[in-house]
Image: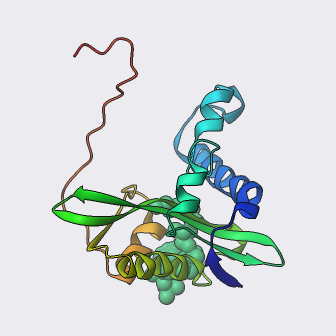
Amino acid sequence: MEIRPLKLKDAEKVRELEVKLIREYFSETIENKWEELPQEWKENLGASSRAHFKAYLDSGLSFVAVEDDEVYGFIFAQMLHHVADANNMVWIENMGVHSYARRNALGYKLLRETLRAGRAMGAEVAHSMLQSDNVPSIMLHKKIGFFMDRREVALIDLKDPNLKL
Ligand SMILES: CC(C)(COP(=O)(O)OP(=O)(O)OC[C@H]1O[C@@H](n2cnc3c(N)ncnc32)[C@H](O)[C@@H]1OP(=O)(O)O)[C@@H](O)C(=O)NCCC(=O)NCCS
């Protein structure tokens, strides 16, 4: 299995894998049936979506695990500037490994590549959003050296027509 930078030719296969993992996540946590969710909303999901893929391709911080031209794992990351007291911060948007290929250190290697590349580009810190019930992901991040503080993320939907600002 090779870990290498994300390429344009990976677009379709990495999209397929990311959507598969998002669906897996939805089926475990959300009652809504995938088929009933709006098509436009589904097309926009994930870093491999048409709107976001290029930014993650160009960032130089996204990697895939491939064998025989099949994609078994991915990490999408980009550099953010002037956040969290840092001039350069690696923002990890999403990562995943095909269920058949898990526990073979692919997730670890993908995350390590992104962190190495980020450090080489001058990043001082990396930020990864974790779901509090995602044990594999939490353990993976801890293994590589991430720490979790007590901060929680607050979100607001600025496109909500009912929002009064
Ligand atoms: C999280 C995920 C990427 C891990 O990928 P992986 O290739 O299986 O992980 P690795 O084999 O590199 O594991 C590295 C370490 O992570 C931890 N880990 C991974 N899977 C684990 C599990 N199921 N239970 C407990 N710890 C686990 C272990 O510490 C492991 O080290 P070890 O094998 O020496 O014990 C994978 O489970 C996945 O794709 N999950 C679904 C998508 C997802 O949750 N993505 C994360 C979004 S932030």
Residue at point 69%, 84% (across, down) = 2
Relative height, residue 143 to residue 20 (above, below): below
In the image, residue 80 sits, relative to residue 46, either above or below, namely: below
Count the numbered circles shown: 0
User: Which one is nearer the viewer's eye here, 20 or 30?
Assistant: 20
Horizontal side, residue 76 vs residue 147: left or right: right
Which residue occupies the extreme right position in the image?
68
Q: Position of residue 64 (x, y in %)?
A: 64, 72
Which is more toward the observer, 152 or 121?
121
For residue 107, which quarter of the picture? bottom right
The x, y position of residue 135, in whole percent, is 44, 66
Residue 89 drawn at (x, y percent):
31, 65
Occupied quadrant, residue 9? bottom right
13 sits left or right of 26 in the view:
right
- State whether residue 37 appears in this view: no
Pick the residue in front: 122 or 156.
122
Which residue appears at 53% of the width and 53% of the height? 55
**In the depicted structure, whether residue 19 falls above or below residue 71:** above
Please say whether residue 104 is visible from this viewpoint. Answer: yes
Q: Quadrant of the C terminus?
A: top left
| Image coloring type | rainbow
Q: What residue sits 63% from the left and 79% below the top?
A: 4
Quadrant of the rendering where the N terminus is positioned? bottom right
